[in-house]
Amino acid sequence: MLEVREVTKTFGGFLALNRVSLRVKEGSFHALVGPNGAGKTTLFNVIVGRYRPDGGEVRLRGQKIHHLPTPKIVRLGVGVSFQRAQAFLSMTARENLMLALLGLKGGVHRARPLAAFEAEAARAEELLGWVGLESVADRPAAELPLGDLKRLDIAMSLAGDPELLLLDEPLAGLSRAERRQMVAFIEGLLRRLGLTLLFTEHDTDAVLRLADRITVLHQGEVLAEGEPEEIKRDPRVIEAFLGGGHAQG
Amino acid sequence: MRVWLPALLILLLLPLFLPRYPVEVLTQGFILALFASAFNLVFFQLGLLSFGHAAFFGTGAYTTALLVTKAGWPYLLTLPAAVLVAALFALVIGFFSVRTSRIYFTMLTLAFAQLLWAIVHKWYAFTGGDNGIPGIPVGSFATSAAGLYYLALALLAAGLYFLYRLDRSPLGYALRAVRDNEARAEAIGLSPFALRLLGFVISGALAGVAGFLQVAWQRSAFPDFLYWTKSAEAIIAAILGGSEHLLGPALGALAFVELGAFVQARTEYWPLVLGLVLLFLVLFFPRGLAGLLGRRDARG
């Protein structure tokens, strides 16, 4: 589904990614872990088109995408959710979703009022139901708690019916209880939809529960890659981060 | 709508009862209201402070003035040309300016406008230089106080209705999305640069309509139409009226012009009074006069 091949990215003299490669198989949940500064978010931003790599390539279903801007990449069937929950705070949850639906179809230049787009309204209602936000649909996003904002963010990333979903630290900022709920929510929803998932996350328990495959980044390079059980036992990973047998981010 | 229609009805009846001078002052208020509302499209919807909107007001005005005096066009027929030329200038200036943000955007728009002002100010052979273009024949309809009043009111109403529709349309939401969160906007397929440029061009075109009207009001065109103080008038009107409300800049413009006429008839210290009013409003009514209407934003 997604292939990152020998990607290098520098900022000034700092080598943020050094010939990083990984493959995300169709239908898999693939985690990208590593400590702060390992290059996870940089790689995430290269994949979604926010950074242009200095070397290497990114392919989606065989098509090179590393030269494309974000709006074009998301229209190829890639859903994106950034590190901090991001919604348009001046709009309600429903308006956020309707705009996402129209934006991903290239339909924002039409003259009718947003509220008059019935098909999008129905689809927004469905998405709100998927993420359990029906009761707050007409509240401004600025008034939503972080957990709801995260759900809204994920719902927006699903608006274009993506085949591949990219989530950058979906649990960041949530309480322990909210994390458990979010992991169950992500697992239940995305497995049901049959999506391929690439995500970065610091929460070890969540990574081990969700991921079919894990890539460990360290100082801009791939340190290890494998199934969760392999990663837990990998001596390089243990030596680099864990100390206790967990693939800590 | 419950605010718009009664207000429009009253405004339609006013010239029947008022003498010429107050009608002319109100007309000037409508012109500034249209200009300030155009400015506010960039200021509120895009979250960018343009200090160069006089460029579009002025190019619209000079397009009309030049077409009437040099090509002999009837005044009213110059409106589409004024809109088009203002939009073209907005396209060029916006192409370079909307890539930048915050203070850089503000400074770039100011620099472009001042550049155009300097050209108009010195190009005697074409624009009349600092003498401007006086004595423009704008036709009997636009010469009569009531005629120009109704023309300005009609164009202001049309402009505000257009902005109202834009505000509720997906495009209006997309403009605000880019303002709220650029990265998120890109992740739902929106192009921030294209949207900012489109918003800037629409705003410039509307400012050109205001410039077109100003020519009839003064029957002249002057380089001051492009000077930074003209841009500042739109900013002051938006702050006075409240930028979050669709009617805010228009209310602010009317208050600015009416108060200005009232105070200047009694004292030479109008700038001092304006400064005090602005201080009072910013400190005690940060949402401007429209905040008194009790609605938080333009979609209420």
Image (cartoon, coloured by chain):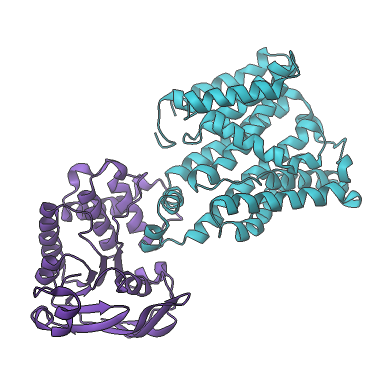
Number of callouts? 0
- Above or below, A237 against B300 in this view is below
Image coords of residue A213 (percent x, y): 16, 79
Q: In screen coordinates, is B178 left or right of B157?
A: left
- Above or below, A159 against A113 in this view is below
Q: Is residue A23 visible?
A: no
Image coords of residue A61 (percent x, y): 30, 82
Image coords of residue B297 (percent x, y): 42, 35
The hue of chain A in the figure is purple
Q: Residue furthest right?
A: B125
Q: Residue at x 8, y 80 (%)?
A: A229
The hue of chain B in the figure is cyan
Nearer-the-camera pick, B222 or B232: B232
- Above or below, B101 against B262 in this view is below
Q: Is residue A39 visible?
A: yes
Q: Residue at x 40, y 32 (%)?
A: B296
Nearer-the-camera pick, B259 or A238: A238
